[in-house]
Amino acid sequence: MVTFKLNDEFMFGTATASTQIEGGDTGNTWYKWCQEGRIKDSSSCITACDHWNRVEEDTELLKNLGVQTHRMSLEWSRIEPSRGKFSDDAMKHYRDEIKLLVENNIKPLVTLHHFSEPIWFHEMGGWKKTGNADIFIEYVKYVVENLGDLVSDWVTFNEPNVYVDFGYVIGIFPPGERSLSEGLKVTAELINTHVKLYRLIHRIRRERKFAGRTMVGTAMHLRIFDGISSTGKMIAKVVDYLFNEMFMEGMTTGHMMFPLSKKGSSHKKGRYADFLGINYYTRNIVEFVFDPSLYFHELVCDKDLTKSDLGWDIYPEGIYKVCKRYYKKYKLPIYITENGISDKNDTKRPSFIASHLAYIAKAIKEGIPIERYYYWTLMDNFEWLEGESTDFGLYDCNFRTQERIPRKSVRLYEQICRRKELTAEMIEDFKKYSGITIETIR
């Protein structure tokens, strides 16, 4: 039976992203991507969860869950709808939203870049054009000066490895390019920008004497990559380096040399993170394929493991492995900035949450300082290329009526958030309530 107990200081929360829930914004790159028919179910982020108009309602959901923290992002294209022109109305909206969190004793963790950018930024060359990073830095300066009294905890970039891989190497996210060399160039830009933002955010909050300890980091998508054959194991190490290690090193120390290149980030090795933000979902088996269009590899699933609705392997031990690996290397506190499952019928989610938290408890007992857990996500949302077809939410969102319908997992997660434990009695009570047996997933 999967049980655990965490300390009173541990913080539970949920995570969302502006493009995926707000709706109504036509100025970001994902709106354009949707208009071009790139989404599997032909849906659009113009609808999403209409959160922009339902902030109070959704904050009430958070309050009822009993979370101590919530991770959210800001939509750059709303705050800076045209180059150098900032929207006071958009800033007031976000201030009011964050104030609601603070008033309800929910600590905000704010993400500055979560996959989307203003269309005008891409029309100027985006991250590929030298000097454009300064535009984003000026935007962040405006944001922190206006929100820094309410927010002490910041994520500069969400999953920069996914952003580069999908947007510039594979070409399935905006801007839809397929170039390894351009991907490496953008990687260097993001690393250098993160270092500057780390210093900037600390400086602004220090000079303005904003209350609270400033915490700045990234939210990195980390996967377990395993090989079975000797060739697969070799390729898995390369994939792990390019997807996990290279970005973690760059975003944490500011220093990274790229393989087969003398070019790297422009900063001396240091420490440019106050925490390690880890988004963990799954594990992949890596196999070699003789196909340059696939960069000589493919990712497959383990036929023996339970799957999510997306076909992803459910592998809770992986969250323990990545936390142990990167704490050993960087000795920084860890926030699990995302962990979740697409599960429409809500039959696997209870065991998914319980099993991952049990491994987190195991890591903490071994001295690894994991301080927060953010479940992805509060409610079903616009899930990028999958559109409205996935079900990661604790709440089912009807995108036509905008009704938020609690899944049975809401009751379980609320009890875990409030009690910071899962006992045999809680498991039995949940089974009586839901008919679902919580089991250890290995």
Image (cartoon, helix red, strand yellow):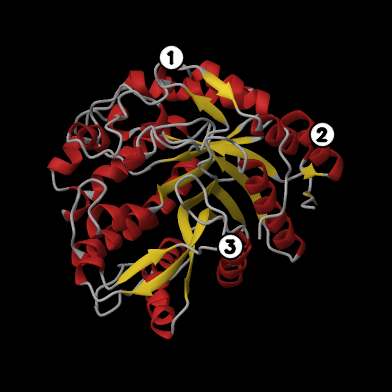
Residue type (three-letter) at the residue carrying disc 3: Gly
Q: Is residue 75 above or below residue 364?
A: above
Point out the frontmost of discs 1 and 3: 1
Residue indicated by mark 2: 429
Q: Secondary structure at mark 2?
A: helix
Q: Secondary structure at mark 3?
A: helix
Could you tell me residue 420's position as x and y percent?
76, 42
User: Where, by quadrant of the figure, is residue 31 drawn?
Assistant: top left
Q: Is residue 421 above or below residue 236?
A: above
Seen at 62% across and 46% down, the residue is 373
Q: Is residue 231 above or below residue 162?
A: below
Q: How busy is the neighbourhood of tag 3: few (under 14 within 10 Å), some, or many (20 plus)?
A: many
Residue indicated by mark 3: 318
Seen at 24% across and 26% down, the residue is 26
User: Where, by quadrant of the figure, is residue 34 drawn?
Assistant: top left
Which of pointers 3 and 2 lies earlier in the amino acid sequence?
3
Seen at 61% across and 36% down, the residue is 69
Residue indicated by mark 1: 401
Residue toward you, 9 or 312 = 312
Q: How busy is the neighbourhood of tag 1: few (under 14 within 10 Å), some, or many (20 plus)?
A: few
| Residue 140 in view in this figure | no
Q: Is residue 301 left or right of residue 287?
A: right
